[in-house]
């Protein structure tokens, strides 16, 4: 089991029904392809207002999905990653319901943030305008706490109440979450939305010095129990590079739009530049349960005056090409068309973003598997899934377009498709071939590139051309070589 081998990202229920079903799938049809799995929120309830990222009880496995013992069985022989939702809890949590009823008389009152928690002397217009939020409007919701009307801090939705990490009560809560996960065999913690935790007057309340202190506190607790931590932050690429120096793992959120740009604009230059400067203690993704990040490659208010990895014009062309490739369905799921208006994401499956082109889909995955880091593969992308417009129309939530609920029969059918079989073949090589434990080198030549891993006499190479999506993946075998996958060559 390698810490750098491929991992699957999935909801237990949407791919396999429950945790035990996920174990059976990883031990069965997906055997050998993944060294680990990031199980998206499986807490009570797993199907709340934000697909499990608003649990009312973060220390309980939703009984519809299984038990802590089921999670321990999943963790046998593989790395399991789980989320610690650091910034907020559900408005329906026992703790916040008590505050709703009793106000400041509740023992949990110090755990929750209101406007006055951060601005006890009041906030000016400039103070409020400075606050960074991933959606339009201010991050407050008017609520009655103990009969008194208050402005409660809600960065994401009114269903998710921000917690005050300056309080003992918040840390008692978070420590109980971390301990529950680690005692169940989880060895990697993903800190969700941690960038928003360090709210301080006089700042934009995002990635402040307090955020570093809070993150370090959780990291130390995890390390003491043999676990590592992945920090989830969307922002300017230079921020990701800075964070990477301080933590175990960061996401390479710049990779998806750069790969999509390369494959839609036949332009490798921005990706080549990123390969020169990116951190390698990264989890690489092409698609996730959230949308395709744009802030991660563009200029940002978080770094005024600094260029992005793509120009605003390149980003506009990329977004339009995704909308065109998806037949307009991604436009229905993105921006003002969707209720969860995220300023930095395009909601679309990877397969639709590439126009359901099998070759380009597989090539995108091969590039990911060769870029240094721990590759995580989202379940919909693994199965080359298309946008789920029916689910989007039922829920009105943009990101649901890339969160399909698969039946067992659907999974069995999808596993027979050529782009799925090709990805699994490449993943099994990536998980087992010794070259990937060695050193990485690469070169570009026009629209072509060669990516190579070498460890002693072992090597693995990917030759590609983004103009026609041709590729050849070849690896050493004994004294010779074997071509794993090829198209157009």
Image: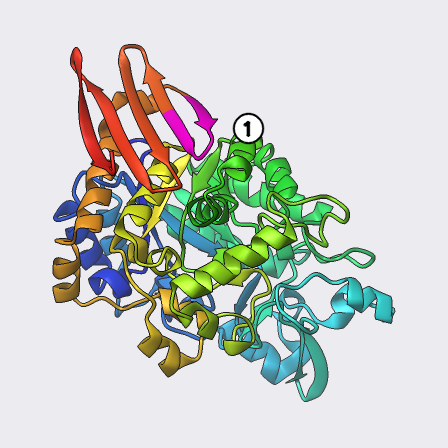
Name the main secondary structure of what is drawn in magenta.
strand
Q: Could you tell me which secondary element the residue under label 1 belongs to?
A: helix
- Measuring from the top left, give residue 236's x and y in whole percent: 64, 47
Q: Is residue 149 visible?
A: yes
The image quadrant where one finds the N terminus is: top left
- Residue 254 appears left or right of 362: right
Q: Which residue is drawn at 45% across and 72% down?
A: 333
Residue at (37% x, 55% y) in the render: 354
Which corner quadrant of the image does residue 104 belong to? bottom right
Q: Which residue is drawn at 17% across and 60% down?
A: 411
- Residue 353 at x, y percent in the picture: 39, 58
Q: Can residue 56 be seen in this view?
A: no
In-front residue for pair 459/289? 459
Q: Where is residue 264 in the image (x, y as percent from the top left)?
A: 44, 50
Judge whether residue 449 is colored magenta: yes
Image vertical order of residue 111 relative to residue 192, above or below: below
- Between 201 and 7, which is closer to the camera in this rendering? 7
> Within the magenta stretch, is there residue 182?
no
x and y percent of residue 424 in the render? 21, 43
Residue span colored magenta = 441-451
- Which image quadrant for residue 413? bottom left
Q: Quadrant of the C terminus?
A: top left
Residue 439 placement, left or right of 96: left
Residue tagged 1:
276
């Amino acid at each position: 089991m390698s810490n750098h081998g491929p991992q699957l990202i999935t909801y237990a229920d949407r791919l396999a029904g429950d945790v035990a079903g996920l174990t059976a799938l990883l031990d069965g049809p997906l055997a050998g392809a993944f060294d680990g799995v990031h199980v998206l929120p499986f807490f009570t309830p797993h199907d709340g207002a934000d697909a499990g990222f608003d649990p009312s009880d973060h220390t309980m496995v939703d009984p519809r999905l299984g038990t802590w013992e089921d999670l321990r069985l999943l963790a046998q022989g593989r790395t399991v990653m789980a989320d610690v939702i650091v910034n907020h809890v559900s408005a329906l949590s026992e703790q916040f319901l008590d505050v709703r009823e009793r106000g400041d008389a509740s023992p949990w009152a110090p755990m929750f943030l209101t406007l006055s928690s951060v601005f006890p002397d009041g906030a000016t217009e400039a103070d409020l305008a400075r606050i960074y939020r991933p959606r339009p409007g201010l991050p407050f919701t008017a609520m009655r706490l103990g009969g008194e009307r208050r402005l409660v801090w809600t960065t994401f939705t009114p269903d998710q109440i921000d917690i005050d990490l300056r309080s003992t009560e918040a840390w008692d809560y978070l420590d109980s979450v971390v301990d529950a996960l680690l005692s169940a065999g989880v060895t990697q913690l993903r800190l969700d939305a941690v960038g928003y935790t360090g709210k301080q007057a006089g700042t934009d309340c995002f990635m402040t010095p307090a955020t570093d202190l809070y993150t370090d506190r959780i990291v130390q607790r995890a390390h003491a129990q043999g676990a590592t931590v992945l920090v989830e932050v969307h922002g300017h690429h230079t921020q990701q590079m800075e964070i990477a120096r301080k933590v175990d793992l960061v996401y390479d959120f710049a990779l998806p739009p750069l790969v999509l740009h390369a494959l839609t604009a036949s332009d490798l230059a921005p990706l080549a530049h990123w390969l020169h400067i990116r951190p390698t203690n990264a989890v690489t993704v092409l698609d996730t349960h959230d949308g395709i990040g744009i802030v991660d490659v563009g200029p940002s208010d978080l770094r005024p005056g600094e260029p992005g990895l793509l120009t605003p014009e390149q980003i506009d062309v990329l977004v339009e090409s995704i909308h065109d490739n998806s037949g307009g369905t991604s436009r229905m799921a993105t921006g003002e068309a969707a209720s969860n208006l995220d300023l930095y994401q395009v909601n679309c499956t990877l397969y639709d973003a590439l126009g359901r082109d099998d070759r380009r889909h597989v090539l995108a995955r091969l590039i990911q598997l060769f870029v240094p880091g721990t590759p995580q593969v989202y379940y919909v992308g693994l199965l080359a899934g298309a946008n789920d417009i029916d689910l989007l129309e039922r829920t009105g939530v943009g990101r649901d377009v890339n969160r399909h609920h698969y039946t067992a029969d659907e999974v069995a059918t999808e596993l027979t498709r050529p782009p799925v079989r090709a990805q699994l073949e490449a993943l099994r090589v990536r998980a087992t071939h010794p070259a990937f434990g060695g050193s990485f080198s690469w070169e570009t030549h026009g629209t072509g590139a060669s990516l190579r891993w070498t460890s002693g006499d072992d090597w693995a190479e990917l030759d590609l051309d983004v103009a026609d999506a041709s590729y050849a993946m070849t690896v050493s075998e004994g004294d010779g070589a074997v071509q794993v996958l090829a198209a157009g060559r």
